[in-house]
């Protein structure tokens, strides 16, 4: 069974979510230090059958690049070179952090837990993946 994973990339931490057949519903996987991201992905890909990696593409409201855009493009290049049999794609991540915070508030997550950036990163990754899955229903 091939899984799809999504990455909400950040300079310090990155959130990772996954979905697997037959339902393809996004689930949180882990929030990790970005410096450990490539090693984590390498291990995860070796232990799991992955067919797609979705990377949240940071954009400003008007669609222009952000301060993270170059770092995210560099990540994609590294992943394309490392995982030649896996589709690596971008997906627009505008508003995901805001949606993640609102989701935690509506879900009754305690204020102290809502302040933890790693929780926002993780939920953002889930939102990116679920949006990607909804947009690509013919998987």
Image (tube, grey):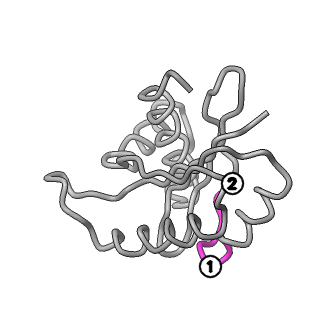
Q: Is 33 colored magenta in this rendering?
A: yes
User: Which residue is situated farthest in the bottom direction here?
Assistant: 35
- Marks 1 and 2 sit apart, C-alpha to C-alpha, by 14 Å
Identify the residue shown where x is 62% and y is 53%: 16
Left or right of 83 on screen, residue 56 = left
In the image, 31 versus 60, the foreground residue is 60
User: Which residue is situated farthest in the right direction here?
Assistant: 47
In the image, 97 versus 18, the foreground residue is 18
In the image, 136 versus 81, the foreground residue is 81
**Residue 129: x percent and y percent?**
52, 40
**Residue 112: x percent and y percent?**
55, 54
Identify the residue shown where x is 66% and y is 42%: 18
User: Which residue in the structure is indicated by mark 2?
Assistant: 30
Identify the residue shown where x is 78% and y is 45%: 49
**Residue 75: x percent and y percent?**
51, 70
Q: Secondary structure at mark 2?
A: strand
| Residue 35 tag number | 1
Identify the residue shown where x is 56% and y is 64%: 80
Which stretch is magenta?
Answer: 31-37
Q: Quadrant of the C terminus?
A: top right
Q: Quadrant of residue 51?
A: top right
């Amino acid at each position: 069974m091939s899984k799809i994973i999504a990455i909400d990339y950040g300079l310090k931490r990155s959130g990772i979510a996954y979905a697997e057949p037959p339902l393809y519903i996004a689930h949180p996987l882990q929030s990790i230090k970005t410096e450990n991201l490539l090693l984590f992905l390498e291990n995860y890909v070796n232990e799991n059958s992955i067919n797609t990696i979705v990377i949240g593409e940071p954009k400003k409201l008007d669609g222009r690049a952000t301060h993270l855009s170059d770092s995210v493009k560099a990540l994609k290049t590294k992943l394309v070179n490392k995982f030649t049999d896996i589709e690596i794609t971008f997906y627009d991540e505008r508003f995901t952090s805001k949606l993640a915070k609102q989701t935690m508030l509506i879900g009754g997550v305690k204020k102290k837990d809502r302040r933890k950036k790693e929780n926002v990163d993780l939920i953002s990754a889930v939102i990116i993946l679920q949006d990607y899955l909804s947009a690509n229903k013919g998987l």
